[in-house]
Image: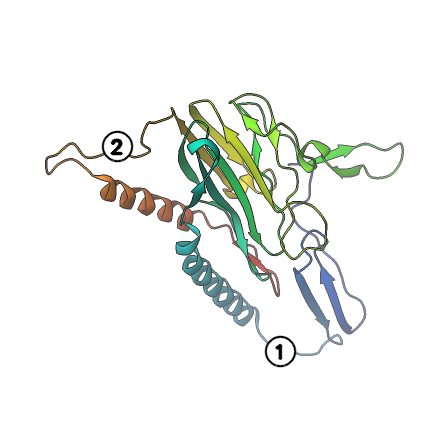
């Protein structure tokens, strides 16, 4: 929000090598090497910019290569003839994070279960369904009698909310689902049964503004997710529809990469 700074500046007065970290992302680290005043820089700013551009291009290529496998929808039989559908929550290997649900859009039948699975080793995510309400603030600003305000994580985002069955109403939230290699206890999956036909938006409350959101379309029981072709060369069959859907998803994901540069971690 506008009350938060967009940059941080620090003047270094002593030569040396200094490490810095992001306390939110444990693998996001950097180093500042301070030389004596008047010493020539090892590289020009243009060379540094070129190095950064090359790193970002390599990360984008790696994320795009990983994207194809992440799009695949995994299903398994559920109780009473229903189906359990898996959605992956981002992707990250510790140096790169892909802020997308995979798939972003899913069509199921009433009574089916959607299971979101954490697939980032480091970055936490949430699964949050607002049911049309306003998204909660991630950070709450608490004024203090003296000094700067206190900034606290909103417990509404941090903690789970709702039952195990979603009917299109109320606030449902997985709470923080930590990275698979983060030594904090807690579940690494979140499941909901959808029992009411309709289309419902879900978001990651941490990364929604980076494009990490999607929709679940729930059809009545027995209605096929993709209608069969009725004949004729102008009618798109299931295979054609599938290619169109995947192509649109790929373009949307490729055009929406958000890039943030650090020395050893880039976020896509």
Q: Which of 100 and 103 is in front in this view?
A: 103
Crowdedness near tag 1: few (<14), some (14–19) or many (≥20) residues, C-alpha within 10 Å = few
Task: Give the residue number, with chain letter if any, for mark 2.
Answer: 227
Tally the numbered discs. Answer: 2
Instruction: Please give left or right for residue 25 compared with residue 216 in the image.
Output: right
Question: What residue is shown at x 43% (from left), y 62% (from top)?
Answer: 61
Question: Between tags 1 and 2, which lies in front?
Answer: 2
Question: What residue is shown at x 39% (from left), y 45% (from top)?
Answer: 252
Q: Where is residue 150 in the image (x, y as percent from the top left)?
A: 80, 38
Is mark 1 in CB contact (under 8 Å) with mark 2?
A: no
Crowdedness near tag 2: few (<14), some (14–19) or many (≥20) residues, C-alpha within 10 Å = few
Instruction: Please give left or right for residue 49 compared with residue 221 in the image.
Output: right
Q: Of the residues under marks 1 and 2, which one precedes in the sequence?
A: 1
Quadrant where the image shows the N terminus: top right
At mark 2, the secondary structure is loop
Q: Which of 58 and 85 is in front in this view?
A: 85
Question: What residue is shown at x 42% (from left), y 48% (from top)?
Answer: 253
- Measured along the vertical axis of the image, is residue 102 above or below residue 150? below
Q: Nearer the viewer, residue 20 or 78?
A: 78
Query: Looking at the rendering, which quadrant does residue 236 occupy?
Result: top left
Residue 253 is tagged as none
Q: Where is residue 78 in the image (x, y as percent from the top left)?
A: 47, 37
Task: Give the residue number, with chain letter if any, for mark 1.
Answer: 42
Q: Where is residue 28 in the image (x, y as percent from the top left)?
A: 65, 59
Instruction: Please give left or right for residue 60 compared with residue 125 in the image.
Output: left
At mark 1, the secondary structure is loop
């Amino acid at each position: 929000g506008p009350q938060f700074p967009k940059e941080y500046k620090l003047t270094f007065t002593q030569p040396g090598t200094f490490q810095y970290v992001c306390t939110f992302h444990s693998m996001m680290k950097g180093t500042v090497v301070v030389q004596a005043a008047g010493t020539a820089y090892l590289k020009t700013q243009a060379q540094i910019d070129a190095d950064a551009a090359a790193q970002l291009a390599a990360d984008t290529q790696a994320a795009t290569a990983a994207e194809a496998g992440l799009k695949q929808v995994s299903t398994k039989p559920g109780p009473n003839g229903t189906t359990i559908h898996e959605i992956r929550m981002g992707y990250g290997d510790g140096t790169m994070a892909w802020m997308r649900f995979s798939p972003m859009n899913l069509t199921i039948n009433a009574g089916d279960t959607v299971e979101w699975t954490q697939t980032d080793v480091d970055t936490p995510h949430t699964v949050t369904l607002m049911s049309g309400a306003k998204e909660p603030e991630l950070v709450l600003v608490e004024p203090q009698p003296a000094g700067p305000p206190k900034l606290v994580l909103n417990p509404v985002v941090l903690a789970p909310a709702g039952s195990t069955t979603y009917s299109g109403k109320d606030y449902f939230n997985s709470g923080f689902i930590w990275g698979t290699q983060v030594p904090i206890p807690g579940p690494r999956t979140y499941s909901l049964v959808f029992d009411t036909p309709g289309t419902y938006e879900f978001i990651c409350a941490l990364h929604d503004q980076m494009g990490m959101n999607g929709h679940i379309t729930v059809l009545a029981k027995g209605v096929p997710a993709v209608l069969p072709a009725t004949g004729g060369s102008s009618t798109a069959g299931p295979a054609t529809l599938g290619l169109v859907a995947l192509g649109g998803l790929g373009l949307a994901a490729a055009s929406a990469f958000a890039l943030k540069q650090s020395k050893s971690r880039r976020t896509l």
